[in-house]
Image (spheres, helix red, strand yellow):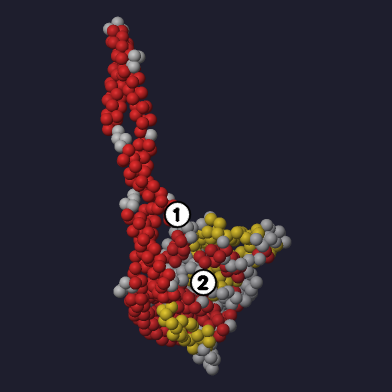
Amino acid sequence: MLVNLSILDFVIVDKMSLDFKSGFSALTGETGAGKSILIDALSLALGQRNDAEVVRLHQDKADISAIFDIKHNQEAIDWLKENELESDGHDLILRRVIHVDGKSRAFINGKVVTLQQLKELGESLVDIYSQNSHHSLLKLSAQRQILDDFGGHSDLALKTYHLYQAWNKLHLQSIEYEKNAQIYSEELAEVRDKVRELKQLSFSFNDWEVLQQEHIMMSHGHELIEDINFCIQILEKDDTAIFDRLHLVQQKISHAISIDEKLKESSELIDSINIQTEELLRSLNRYLQKVDLDPEKLKDIEARIQSIHNFGRKHRIKPEDFESILLTWQERMDLLESYQSDDGIEKKEKIAFKAFNESAQLLSQARKTASETLSRNITQAMQKLSFSHGRFEVKLMPQGPMANGLEYIEFLVAPHLGAELRPIHKAASGGELSRLSLAIRVASISKANVPCMIFDEVDVGIGGSVAEIVGKLLKELGNHNQRQVLVITHLPQVASLALYHFKVHKTQENNQTLSHIQLMDEQMRIDEIARMLGGLLITETTREHAKEMLQI
């Protein structure tokens, strides 16, 4: 849901900030007052391409920000997560800065993004229906989604999609295997040999590190023993042995402490040093007793190290990668073996296709039933909106297996008596397309996932009772599940039914024309509806008529 739109130095707007709520809101004003500015600004914040002329005269840049509440918009939440642009709360902030030279920058939650990213996200936030805008209802994917939502079988459509992906993966593997059966057979033999050879090494990286350390020790064993014996000699066996000298120091300090007790700490230190020295001697002697410099063992170690290096060089693999590559080879071997097994890829493909086909057949039947009902509902809604004798049809065109089922779905319309059913983008003019969009949304809204809808002059070319019907339908749209409907209108029958009413007006300030939009209170609404009813001269009669329409 759109929460706030802030506009700075855009066309004839100097500074504007508008807050919006859920439900039906109307936007009215004199012709040329700048009602389309709001839609134009929001469209740019949603990723529409721009030109430099949108920057207000004598300014360097235009700055547009739109804040959305997306706590109930899972599609937008998922997109943000996939693109690592999610925010901590439920608010989403889109921003577009357009410079006077035509260059622009786009932001999502304060992070710089591409225009394409802004556009992708924008498609899950707002649908704009106007004579000039390209909106989602013209896309076959949106038409399919409307039908599936209306029929209540979106979960079945999603299941069918996943079953198709599973089958198609096996199908492509099967084709690839048939084309390269001999190559795969040779690859399997090669992989088997490599797996067997690597397993025979009984390799583990932890053992490999221990083995290398042991090899270093045994290769320098004599040098190591010489060093240890030298240390023992210095500590204990030399004429100036450290151990004997430490004992002498200990005796002297023991005598001195009887004279001055302040040497107690020094006495404790020399005692500790003597104990540690004795422990060091014992440790070095134990090491000498355990050290094993068996030449045969060294040969075995060198032979194992050599076999590991030989395997690594042969397959161009470092020993630290042996364990991971074994898993990779094993997985590849299992896959290739599965191709040749009794329940190999051909059988798996048949099972997967059967599961997909059963789900797709159920989906086709559900779509057929829903399409008949939806066609009737939209036809009835069209005829209420001055499409006399108009017809609508949801056409299902059978196709081969596809991710979205077994048929293409397209909306066809005949706007008047004798007209041929044609795709909606070809059969309806700009004004008709807006009203047709309204009919489609009203007829299918119960389960549709469109949080914010904007209709620009959906009432062009109609009046009287039809205008009142349009207003009631728009109000009905806004009453569904906290949805937001914003309508730009010239008709008092439509505006009077809005929950919130904004007025657009122009002022002349400092030799400049500026456009302003404000939310009206009750008295202002009465005056505005009266203006729409009676023109520039507002009488008490028109005011009373306005109050009646507003039910005040």
What numbered label is drawn on residue 246?
Answer: none
What residue is at 42 percent from the left and 80 percent from the top?
A: 401
Q: Nearer the viewer, residue 67 or 241?
A: 241
Q: Amino acid at mark 1?
A: Arg
On the image, the x and y values in percent for residue 99 come to: 65, 59
Q: Which residue is mark 1?
A: 316
Q: Is residue 362 above or below residue 99?
A: below
Q: Secondary structure at mark 2?
A: strand
Q: Is residue 107 above or below residue 408?
A: above
- For residue 270, which quarter of the picture? top left
Q: Nearer the viewer, mark 2 or mark 1?
A: 1
Q: Secondary structure at mark 1?
A: loop
Is residue 332 visible in the rendered image? The answer is: no
Taking the image as shown, residue 488 lies to the left or right of residue 403, namely right
Q: Earlier in the sequence, mark 2 or mark 1?
A: 2
On the image, the x and y values in percent for residue 488 come to: 56, 73
